[in-house]
Image: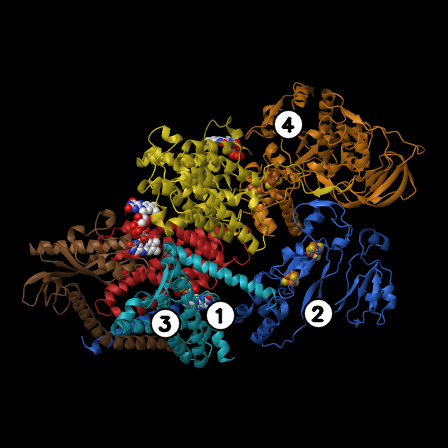
Amino acid sequence: MTKVNIMKNMPEKVIIPLKQHDGSICEPLVKKGDMVCEGQKIGECGSYDSASVHSSVSGEVVSIEEAPHPSGNKVNSVVIQPSEDAECVDFKPKDVPVSELANLIKDAGIVEHYGTPTHMVLKPEGKNIDTVLVNATSSEWIGGHYDTPSQYSSQVLDALKLLMKAAGASRGAIVLRNDDLESISAFDGLNFDGKNITVAPLVGKRKVKYYFKDMASDIVVVSQDHIYGRKILDLFTYNVTGRKVSFGCDPTDVGVAICSVKSAKALYDAVNAGKPYIETVVSVSGKVKDPQKILVRIGTPFKDVIEACGGYIGEAGKLIANGAITGVAQYTDDVPVSKTTTSIFVQSVDEVVRGESVACIHCARCVDVCPVNLVPSRLTALADQGRFDECRQMHIMNCVECGRCAAVCPSKIHVLQLIRYAKSSIEKAYEDFAPKQSSTNLKLGCCGGE
Amino acid sequence: MTLTTLLIQAMATLGGLGLVIGIMLIAASKLFKVETNPLVEEVVEVLPGANCGACGFAGCADFAERVVNENAPLDGCPVGGFETVKEIGGILGQEVSEAEKEYPYLRCNGGIHCVDRFDYVGIEDCTAVIMLSDGEKGCNYGCMGRGTCVRACPFDAITIGEDRLPIVNKNLCKSCGLCIEACPNEVLMFAKDSEKVHVQCNSHDKGKAVKAVCEIGCIGCKICEKNCPEEAITVTKFLAEIDQDKCTACGICVEKCPQKCIEIK
Amino acid sequence: MTESNRDIVIIIGKLVLISVVASALLAITYVPTSEQLKKNYAEARTATLAELMPQAAEFEAVYGDEIINDEGDREILYYRAKDSSGNLIGYAFFRQHPGAQGLLEVAGGVDVSFNEVTGMSVMSHTETPGLGSKITEPAFRDQFKNVKVADLSLSKSGGAIDSITGATISSQAVIDALNAQVEVIQVAEG
Amino acid sequence: MTFTISAPPHKKESITFNKLTLAKIIALMPVVLLSVYLFGLPALGIVIAGILAAVVTEVAIQKAFDQKITIADGSAVLIGLMIAMVVPPEVPLWIPMIGSVFAIGIGKHAFGGIGSYVFNPVLAAWVFLSLAWGSIMAPASYPQTTALSDLVLETGAGVMAGVSPLALLLAGCILILLRYVEWRIPVSFFVTTILLAVLLGDSLSYVILGVVLFGVLFLATDTSTSPVTKNGRVIYGIVCGVLVVVYGHFANYVDATFYGLFLANCVSALIDNNTLPGSYGSETYLQRKYKRILSKVPFKDRLEVLLDD
Amino acid sequence: MAADVSLFQIFMDGVFIKNFLIIQFLGLCSFVGVTKDTKSAAGMSGAVIFVMALAATVSYLIYSFVLIPLKLEFLSLISFIVVIAALVQLVEFVVRKNIPSLYRSLGIYLPLITTNCAVLGVVLLNVLNEYSFIQSVVFGVAAGIGYTIVMLMMSGIRERSTLVSVPSSVRGLPQAFFIATMLSMAFVNYFGVIPL
Amino acid sequence: MNALSEFIRGITKDNPIFGLVLGLCPTLAVTTSIENAIGMSAGTAFVLICSNLLISALRKQIPPSVRLPIFILIIATFVSIVEMVMKAYFPPMYAALGVFIPLIVVNCIIIGRAEAYANKNNMFYSLIDALGSSTGFLLVLVLIGGIRELLGTGQIVTFGVQIIQLPINPITYMILSPGAFLTIGVLMAIVNYRKAKKLARGG
Ligand SMILES: Cc1cc2nc3c(=O)[nH]c(=O)nc-3n(C[C@H](O)[C@H](O)[C@H](O)COP(=O)(O)O)c2cc1C
Ligand SMILES: Cc1cc2nc3c(=O)[nH]c(=O)nc-3n(C[C@H](O)[C@H](O)[C@H](O)COP(=O)(O)O)c2cc1C
Ligand SMILES: Cc1cc2nc3c(=O)[nH]c(=O)nc-3n(C[C@H](O)[C@H](O)[C@H](O)COP(=O)(O)O)c2cc1C
Ligand SMILES: Cc1cc2nc3c(=O)[nH]c(=O)nc-3n(C[C@@H](O)[C@H](O)[C@H](O)CO)c2cc1C
Ligand code: SF4
Ligand code: SF4
Ligand code: SF4
Ligand code: SF4
Ligand code: FES
């Protein structure tokens, strides 16, 4: 297990975006010149689809302005200059009743790595959650904050219980990756709640429901192949539970809440240490002198993080938040680490992919690699011509944005970019009347095509 | 066989055939009657048939139906031009008068004069660039020059020029406005040929911010506003706007503008 | 369509009227033209026969048993060609045969000993213009002048006739027609 | 420091179209060399004439229509080379040249160039030449692969593409393993042809003629003219196989390859349009049937998991 | 002579060897007009098969039982075309009433089957070849199937072609003709090889 | 409306083949040689002129609901008459054209012009329209026929006179059906290209 370093140097200033989640932007609770403490709430929004924002350092608010955000767009942010003289509060464990857990989560500003505030996932308005899944299949989040695998496994299980409590769900599962033997061995044989845990593989039609029954337990640990992509929630839900999510819906519509290890840990800390979500583990890789996993304060600019990792090697050509396959390229290294930042990847100028795209040669390599049976080449052509309705009928909304199609294309077509273009246009067009009824019979991402 | 018998037989045969067919067709037309408005079909006839949707309806036939049955405006089809409007008017018995033709006008002269914040690799499309980050150009209001409008135009009327700004070929443009709709930054607008003077900038940023990213952007200095003898110019939110009804195309503002961002055609 | 019954009658009446007028016109045209056609047909046949066997002075029709029209005429199987002194110098015939696109009608002549074909002529055909239609052209037809019956096959199969490029089917059809009819006559004449 | 911005993914495989064509050209080289050995210098002349005409046509057309000149991608060279390989080596030089002009001008650019054409330009050119000058295009001999040595060097081959089945097979297999060439089409093609040939009583040696291998590995797998869906490619291979065997059974397998694959090109788009995959996770027809049968099985408690929820 | 032509041969002739669209050039207007998408092409083809079979039947009856006995063969052209016109108009009425979507997509082309050379072609060829009743009907259906096959191929290719870049001056009709060139090349020699 | 411009329109803008895209079947089927092209155009022109005149004359009498059958009746009558008369009295000409005459019935140009023009205009203009369309049809047919004959046979022989001979190996392909499609495809692409150029220049 890779060791997580803690970033020691205090950054010159931290930039805390007032919106680090999908939903409404927070109103600043401070103004220029105010002194703030570490952990102090500095932004809040009354509406349910929002998560509070806290200061990650003690210091002085130097400005509240539109600043770069790792999502690519500029967002209203609080810029704080750390200073020694600000007094600090100690965090105290909180004893909260179950009914208050969701509010605690919102208040602690816990957000899933994919952007949705965690309380929205656990307690969606008007929906019931019966199963909570902790997704530990993505390498970046495993082991963050924990010193040993055993500590990690029991804490995650505790966190899962908390999540289930918060959601009012009866069942929960931790989903590991088949090739992450370290974690598997950490869970295997673990005694939890008087039961021995066995890590069970998800194969074929043997979904998690089978293991709940087979092991006569409400909490199971399962493992599956690594799937990746930005929009894997629906696919993940289907692969793990067999439930299909229809167009315009999300897993909560079929009673499934998906949390990351990271938010599970944050909830654990919020309850057991009273600590809001102010620091996160970021794995820094690529062309930096000392690639590592590093615990940083939210709001730390990328350049300070990279500095802490020894700085760039040579001239950097591309700075990517969240990984080389699905991440967002940044145009400046002044962007801050936000709650949804999991990694920073640096490419040198020569490594930047700039293949000029030529016409699609219908080689079908993209078709062969697509994990959700799409025909990316055709979707691309349709998207390029603005024929979004036909894209929709070809299940474009199923795309998990894994980028494999674009990676293998010999014509260097910007396949994924075009697909996302079409998806965003379709979403815009359907915003107003998305069919929000939930059903387990609907096909995964079935978008009215049939 | 004599000519007479042949004649009679032939006439009887074909006449009988005609009779049978006539009766059959009339019967069928009664049996399978479908109500159609002949006016609609006439209007469809005169429409250009491009089915481009510029009228805002689902194709030419739909537009025709709306014009006839739901009083949609006669000049709803921008593609057909005045000829079509006149013909529709003729069919529906309405008087029409010709409006002056409008063409898309680009309110930005940035192009290569405006700095790029980064180096973009991806599909040639302004909306796509904006999806990735707020846009490639230093100015968030200006033209991206990635040609979303070019792709939107069904008549191939727009090309991107040397200076990375779109050029509209007025011979090909049918004033359908699809490009204007498509532009993510709303820098295109309709302008009549008779409107001679235009501000070539769309930036509402403060003067300093404009100067930092663009050599020729409007900085909102109000010199033009003060100098215009017709009081046709107002500067709102750091951007000059010309009231075309008042403008006499005297050209004074063009001369006075320190940034040279007012154009006279 | 909101015609009253009266309108319907008028419409049908007009339809019938036009049909009747049209058929009358056609019938009136048909009678003289069909006469002329028969004449042309006979003339064309005579001319072709004469061309195939220039030495012959008279062609004696050999009738089959089948009755082909109301007047009780019987079908003509072939002609015996006789010179001015009445000697039998050969046989001439017309033969229909399927070509590449439709029926061909081929005329041919053969000498008394069934040794040589005297010539060939295509009376009618519906072959592809530019391809099969070349069977009417002299370049193809002239190959059949005085060709041995034994050599009556395509050069591909060792015969004396070069087929038309791209129209082997038509070329073969002409040859087949001649061969078949020569055989028929041979059998009939013993 | 100016950063680059692009949509994900930020890492891509290094494969390019140019590499694909280059690999195919290299893969064909052994066969070209063997045929020069077999047919002598005229074969070399044909190759040069074909390639030259293809490249010149490509440049001329792209100049005339203000397009980017793309001879560097090797597609014109590959087309010219393949045309040289499918005409008999004893034809006059203008035959491959006109073939190349037709292939590039009509077969490729009239349909929109790389990726847009629906009919393989090489096949189109071969059919054109055969229809235009049938007698010139008839090969001097049709191969009769009988001995094992014929697989290495087929002396009876009438065209260059047929001189060495083994060299073609090796080249094709390497390309398939490198994933430069699609595997579904050749596999389903060979399964089909072998089954059909056995059924019709044709000698199996015809199925592995050099020309047939060339056709299947290099022409049928032309990406632009074959379906992109997975099922579509399997079906396409079967269609190719059936069409080649039918013609080959009645005539010969050399012409059959070209005519059959060309005819298969005509239905490729139709196959493609009708085999678009359904939504991920939706049941196929067979799965539904399977489920219904299972639900009738009495001892289904252990099988139940397969039924999902 | 027609009696010795096997039904299989007539069928193959109609479907492939003498394919109406791309070998005989009959019915081209709908070929280039209604093949932009597979649905319309299939609908049009269905209508054509139906009309062809019907026309072959009716025209045979009229020809053998009215025109020949009365020696009015010279009226064959005019009576055939009138009968076809009436049939098509009937089909049009029915389709317009019952399948409006199909009617809309076939647009002007449905009435145009009337003068679709292909339908008249079937009838005239039946007479020319002296086909018997059963042969006539088989030929009519075969011609319709041949028409359908080519229409489907064409529409599949044209549908796919909308996804790729085609030079603007080739887009539309010229492209349709280029595709037709290739289809025709593929058909012209292939099926002749099958012995009938 | 001016007679000359109506006439020219039939050759250029409303050219039956390139403008209206009507009557493709005979265009492709008979253009294996210039001779056939001329013959077909002549037959078509005769029927087109006669039917346009007659339909224009009768246009007020023709009930709209049975318009089509009546047009067809009229056209078929003319075609049959032409066929019979020619067969009987001009056998050599019939020999050259015979095959194509019945095809005229279904030539979309005739019914198309009847419907689009003669049914709405007076006899004089209908005549001019028929003349214009016929001329346009003739020119295109001769062009296509010329190209196909020259390339396909290596020479052009019209009414027994050899006009030109090329020192090439005849391209049989051009005589076959694909050659017809190819020729018209290339010609149409050229026409489109020129149209687009003209439009962009503001013509
Ligand atoms: C697929 C195909 C099969 C052929 N089969 C034969 C054949 O079996 N016998 C033959 O003599 N020629 C055959 N040929 C050659 C053609 O018939 C060739 O066009 C002909 O020999 C030249 O035409 P011509 O003799 O009419 O000038 C074949 C050609 C092709 C394309
Ligand atoms: C449109 C078309 C028309 C044809 N017309 C004829 C024809 O009139 N006569 C004929 O013999 N073959 C005709 N054929 C058949 C081909 O020419 C056939 O391939 C040829 O006869 C084969 O012989 P070859 O290649 O050996 O010369 C036609 C084929 C097509 C496609
Ligand atoms: C007959 C056969 C041949 C195969 N050949 C190859 C091959 O050449 N290259 C390869 O990568 N995989 C080959 N495979 C394996 C397939 O790649 C494998 O089944 C496929 O990747 C499964 O995933 P897919 O169906 O999603 O593509 C072959 C499989 C079969 C049955
Ligand atoms: C009544 C009638 C009217 C026609 N009018 C047109 C027309 O306006 N435009 C057109 O493109 N084709 C027209 N045609 C041509 C049409 O016949 C079609 O292209 C062919 O009949 C198909 O074989 C018309 C045909 C008929 C029967
Ligand atoms: S379309 Fe591309 S990005 Fe989307 S799931 Fe398929 S391979 Fe991944
Ligand atoms: S990988 Fe690229 S070239 Fe190949 S089919 Fe997909 S989009 Fe087209
Ligand atoms: S005008 Fe608008 S759409 Fe056109 S290039 Fe500029 S920003 Fe893009
Ligand atoms: S330039 Fe704009 S307004 Fe003009 S035709 Fe094109 S899209 Fe329409
Ligand atoms: S002329 Fe139009 S279909 Fe034949």
Q: Say which chain is orange.
A: A
The disc placed on residue B90 is: none
Q: Colour of chain F?
A: cyan
Circle 1 sits in a helix, a strand or a loop, which is it? Answer: loop
The answer for how far apart the CA atoms under marks 2 and 4 are is: 65 Å
Q: Nearer the viewer, residue D91 or C132?
A: D91
Q: Are marks 1 and 2 on the same chain?
A: no
Say which of marks 2 and 3 sits in front. 3
> What residue does disc 4 label?
A177
**Residue F14, disc:** 1
Is any atom of residue F191 visible in this view?
A: yes
Give the Cα distance between marks 3 and 4.
81 Å
Residue identified by numbered label 2: B193
Chain to which the residue tagged by mark 1 belongs: F
Observer-nearest of B94 and B204: B204
- The chain whose colour is blue is B
Q: Nearer the viewer, mark 2 or mark 4?
A: 2
Amino acid at circle 4: Arg
Return the mark for residue F42: 3
Q: Is A71 on the left-hand or right-hand side of A137?
A: right
Determine crowd level at label 3: few under 14, some 14-19, many 20+ residues with C-alpha closer than 10 A.
some
Circle 4: is it few (<14), some (14-19), or many (20+) Cα within 10 Å?
many
